[in-house]
Image (cartoon, helix red, strand yellow):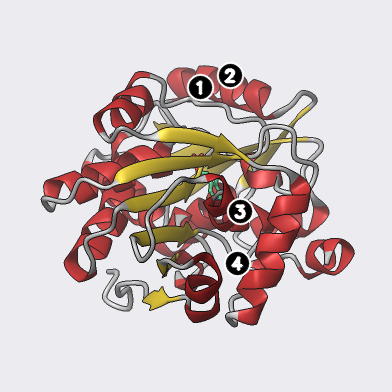
């Protein structure tokens, strides 16, 4: 079913490597079919849902997960329920609507969308693809970790982080492939531009904390000014990322590292999906 799906590129970021005196790589998850790493999760979610006999999948989302899962449900013939906050950015909403899921707009914020959807999925026998409820999503992210490990032995791997599903899954994949870099969770708790990771919800909870401890990892919170600067640096490398994705690059200046250490940043979501947002902030 997913024969068109291949690995994402791991590219050396030349200018950034020179300016930070590092060997800096980007794992370009924006090359996935719907433009974010969420496709890694959706492939696993849809396959698992079909295997378990579900005809309907659902999740709450800040945008990319909804775009991705509704696309993969659509091409697999599954029904899809998406829960979003009424504050959802209009460009994201337009992309979600393309794949015709049932959209539930919640009065409150993302946490409330998670709460309401968890309740509904239990009652209505919908496959629950919410963070903290779905090991298939962690497996999808583990594929990213394995691919990184096949090509480099990084000292640091940096992941933009909100719920911690991406971070935890990438660490699992790296560990399974025999690599133990220090993991950095890039958060933007007070951001007004990186809405995909706004708030740092940490919904994976215990598994996220275990990944952080096992990898001797740290959480680095970045500002919107640092994210904008990182976005501009990525554009010079030819990569149009969305603000949340640039958070991984924005953390580098906060790290203590030795010259020429190997650092891999996951670049999780494409800016090309949100041209109005990008035009506004750059
Ligand atoms: C582009 C992007 N990067 C990173 C994340 C954070 O992933 P997680 O919620 O698994 O921590 C998200 C989550 O929506 C996202 O859309």
Q: Between disc 3 and disc 4, whose residue precedes?
A: 3
Query: Taking the image as drawn, is residue 123 in sight?
Result: yes
Find residue 157 and report its horizontal and vertical position in percent: 37, 51
Label 1, label 2: how far apart the Cα atoms are = 5 Å
Ligand 1: does it lie within 8 Å of the C-beta at label 1?
no
Q: Between disc 2 and disc 3, whose residue precedes?
A: 2
Q: Between disc 1 and disc 4, whose residue precedes?
A: 1
Image disc number at residue 92: none
Residue 16 left/right relative to 233: left
Q: Nearer the viewer, mark 1 or mark 4?
A: 4
How many dots with numbers?
4
Helix, strand or loop at mark 2: helix
Helix, strand or loop at mark 1: helix
Q: Nearer the viewer, mark 4 or mark 2?
A: 4
Q: Between disc 3 and disc 1, whose residue precedes?
A: 1
Whether 120 is drawn above or below 83: the answer is: above
Residue 273 left/right relative to 76: right
Q: Residue furthest right?
A: 280
Label 4, label 2: how far apart the Cα atoms are = 28 Å
Whether 108 is drawn above or below 26: the answer is: above
Label 3, label 4: how far apart the Cα atoms are = 16 Å
Give the residue pinned by disc 4: 270
Say whether marks 1 and 2 touch (CB < 8 Å): yes
Say whether marks 3 and 1 touch (CB < 8 Å): no
Q: Nearer the viewer, mark 3 or mark 4?
A: 3
Give the residue pinned by disc 2: 115
Label 1, label 4: how far apart the Cα atoms are = 28 Å
């Amino acid at each position: 079913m997913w024969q068109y799906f291949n690995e994402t590129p791991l590219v050396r970021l030349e200018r950034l490597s020179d300016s930070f005196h590092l060997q800096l790589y980007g794992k370009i998850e924006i090359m996935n079919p719907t433009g974010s790493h969420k496709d890694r999760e959706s492939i696993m979610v849809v396959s698992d849902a079909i295997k378990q006999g579900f005809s309907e999948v659902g999740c709450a989302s800040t945008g990319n997960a909804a775009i991705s899962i509704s696309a993969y449900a659509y091409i697999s013939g599954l029904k899809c329920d998406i829960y979003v906050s009424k504050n959802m950015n209009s460009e994201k909403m337009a992309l979600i609507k393309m794949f015709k899921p049932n959209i539930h707009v919640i009065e409150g914020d993302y946490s409330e969308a998670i709460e309401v959807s968890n309740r509904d999925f239990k009652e209505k026998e919908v496959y629950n693809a919410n963070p903290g409820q779905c090991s298939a999503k962690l497996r999808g992210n583990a594929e990213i970790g394995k691919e990184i490990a096949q090509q480099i032995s990084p000292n640091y791997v940096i992941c933009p982080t909100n719920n911690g599903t991406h971070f935890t899954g990438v660490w699992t994949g790296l560990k399974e492939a025999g690599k133990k870099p220090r993991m950095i969770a890039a958060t933007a708790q007070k951001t007004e531009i990186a809405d995909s990771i706004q708030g740092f919800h940490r919904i994976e909870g215990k598994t996220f904390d275990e990944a952080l401890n096992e990898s001797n990892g740290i959480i680095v919170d970045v500002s919107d000014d640092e994210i904008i600067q990182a976005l501009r640096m990525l554009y010079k490398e030819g990569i149009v990322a969305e603000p949340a994705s640039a958070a991984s690059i924005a953390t580098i200046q906060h790290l203590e590292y030795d010259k020429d250490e190997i650092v891999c940043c996951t670049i999780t979501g494409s800016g090309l999906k949100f041209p109005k947002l990008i035009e506004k902030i750059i």
